[in-house]
Each structure stands twice: as structure tokens, then as C-alpha cells.
Amino acid sequence: MHIAWIGKKSPFCGNVTYGREVTNALLDRGYRVSFIHFAQEETGVEDGWGDCQEVSIPFLYKSQIYTIPSPKSSRVLTDALRQLKPDLVHASLTLSPLDFLLPEICQELNLPLVATFHPAFARKARNFTSSTQHLAYQLYAPSLANYDRTIVFSKLQRDLLIRLGVPKKRLAVIPNGVDADKYSPGLSKLKTDLKAQRIFVYQGRISVEKNVEAMLRAWKQSAIHRHSKLVIVGNGPLAPSLMSTYGEEQGVIWLGFIADEQDRIQILRGSDVFILPSLVEGLSLSLLEAMSCGVACLATDAGADGEVLEKGAGVVLSTQRVAAELRTLFPLFQDHPELTTLLGRKARERVLDRYTLSQNITQLEVLYHQVLQDQRVYYSSSI
């Protein structure tokens, strides 16, 4: 089967990781994959990422959050799909105006269309950030109703889109998956390098919706020993101001963005506790990666993250009381290593049970065949 994958290669974000991991896994299973993404120069169909053919679509602006295509991007995409002749198009939606044109383009070319819808969400609209994210769901729902299938990561997302008018039959719940062989417990020199006895880690974007400041405030106010460190991996708009307030004197280590995957794995393997204090989320790949490495995890009930940790796989924080709860939990997890060992083991077990990349790809294969079968039935009944 030939899949035309529309996604992101840069800047680095969860969507980039999702596209890389899924397309590589599809290639390993014998699929042919063409990777279509936004790049400054239109280069047509050429060899690219891994063993994928690659197509570049011109754009005016691109960020981790959204993309503004150039006026000719839809023509470039249509011509590329006509040339590639894939069996199916899978769009890992990039929050771009082009997303709304894809159903029309694919209908014109008689190509079945699958989407993965990534935007973060809150269970309830508690603040401006979560309200803004909910608006994205309202904006996209009418268009998603025209995709053959839309993949979401949790039943919560599915139910939200159903309430907004997307037919249930056009939605599929396939959780994010992580390569549990690659992301696994192992040895690390992190504690030796940082001269630390206990390490807490945050890995992600340093921005308002991630609520990193509440975590840092709780850390500063907690009874933390000087041999315990809070390691921050990532960058973002709030990083400069937070770095000037919270530094090594408070036991906070800023490592910035780390591109090398093996380096990120070594950090997780050397950490005792992973914290995700977000106000809104989808299903965090960073959380799943930490769990798969056997790290005890504390995460808010934003998006589907609370669902991942429920029933003992981790500690679920309230988005409304993050700082207060962390002030209590930081000393507890610092002083009781047996607790982090137990939760780390349960986190790893949860990933192996529900969230492996292999399980994700198997479900995706079933979905592809269902969509193609539906298309055959539709066209045979139309004759």
C-alpha cells in the first residue's frame, strides 16, 4: 500500500515526532510512504526522510503551533498527489488553512483521506488558554466531518468532536505509541554529571499552556535538599524570564532544547520523577517516553494525560492546584525513593499494556484497510 503522509519535519514538536515514528514504522512493515511537508522552496517529488519520497510545499510562516501556506501551496499539493498516485492520504494536521482544503482536493482525485488531529484540550474550559484550545475544536469540526476518518488520541477528544457535530463513524481513537524497546530503563551518568542524588525532570515547551512557572514556584517553596535537582529540557517564549528567576541557586538546571534522541533518553533514564504541569494537552509523547523509561510520573488531568496515569500508573494533578500539590509531592518523592521505584515500574507496565508504537501501527493498519474497503463499497454502489 502506498501512503501519502502530509505532516511536519520542522520545527521540532510532538507532531514532528509522531510523523517520524509512524512513517518509519510503516516503512518497516513494507508500506511505501511519500512524505509531504512545508518547506521554503518547492522542490517537487524527490527522495527524502528515511526511505520516503519527499515533497516540499511552499509556505509563508511556520512555527511549532501553526503554519501559513503560500497561495500556490494547494496547487503544488494537488499536482504532487496526482503524480504520486497513492492509495490513501494521511494528514497529520499542521493547523494550517490547507487542512480545510484537503477534503476537496482528495475528493477531486478520488483519494481516501485520513487525518490525525493533535490540538491540546482541557476537560473543562477553566481559563483563557483552555478556552482558546476549545475554539480550535469548534473551528475544525465542520471540516473534519468531511474526512473519511479522523484519528484522535482519547475517548475524551472523540466525545468532544461528536458534540461539535463530527459523525461518530468518522472518528477513530488510536492513542499515541512509543517504541518501548528504544525508550526503556537503563544506565545513565546523569546524576554523576550533575552531582545530584535525586533528579526531577520536565521535558517540553517553555510556554504559558505548559504551566512551567507553577512547577518552578512550587519547587522553590518546597523543602528541597541541595543534592536534589530540577532539570528543564526544552525552550520556548517564557524561558529567558524564568531562567533569570530560577537558577542553580534553587537547584534548577536548564539544559535547553536537546535534539539528539539518545541524549534525551539518557536524561530520562537518569531521572527519578517526570513532571508535566500543563493546563492543556492532547496525549503527551514526552509523558509516554518517560513512563516507558520507568520514570515515576506526575501529570495534570489536562487532555488525556490523566487517563494515561489513572489507577496507579502515576500521580494525577489538578490543573487548578498544580503549585499547591507539587509543594507537597516534591519532598515526598525526594525522601522516599521506594515510591518512585514502584511508580516507575507501574508506568512502564502501563505503556507496555496500552501505548506501544507497535500496537499503534497495528490499529492504524486496520483503519487504513477499513477506509479503503469503505471506498470500494461506495464506488461499487454508485455504478
Image (spheres, grey):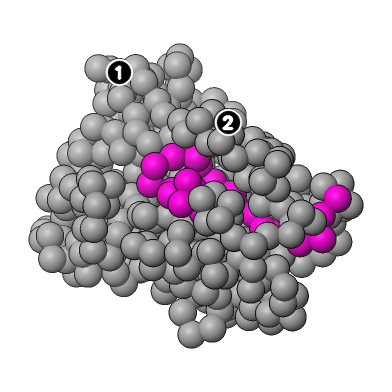
Name the residue nearer the viewer: 174 or 266.
266
The amino acid sitting under disc 2 is Ser
Residue 368 appears in view = no
Of badges 2 and 1, nearer the viewer stands 2
Which quadrant would residue 50 be assigned to in this image?
top right
Looking at the image, which is closer to me, 327 or 114? 327
Please identify the quarter of the rendering in which residue 173 is found: bottom left
Quadrant of the frame with the C terminus: bottom left
Label 2 Cα crowd, 10 Å radius (few <14 / some 14-19 / many 20+): few
Which residue is denoted by mark 1 in the rendering?
70
In x, y percent, where is residue 314?
55, 75
Kindly state the secondary structure of the residue where label 2 is placed.
Answer: helix
Q: Report whether 277 appears left or right of 119.
A: right
Q: Residues within 10 Å of mark 1 (few under 14, many from 20)?
A: some
Q: Position of residue 380 (x, y in %)?
A: 18, 62
**Residue, x 50% and y 42% (percent of image)?**
205
Q: Is residue 253 above or below residue 190?
A: above
Q: Is residue 118 magenta?
A: no
Q: Which residue is mark 2?
A: 244
Q: Which residues are magenta?
A: 195-215
Magenta residue check for 201: yes
SS at badge 1 = loop
Residue occupying the point 28% across, 47% down: 129
Query: In whole angstroms, how far apart are the C-alphas of marks 2 and 1?
Result: 38 Å
Whether residue 194 is visible to the viewer of this picture, yes or no, is: yes
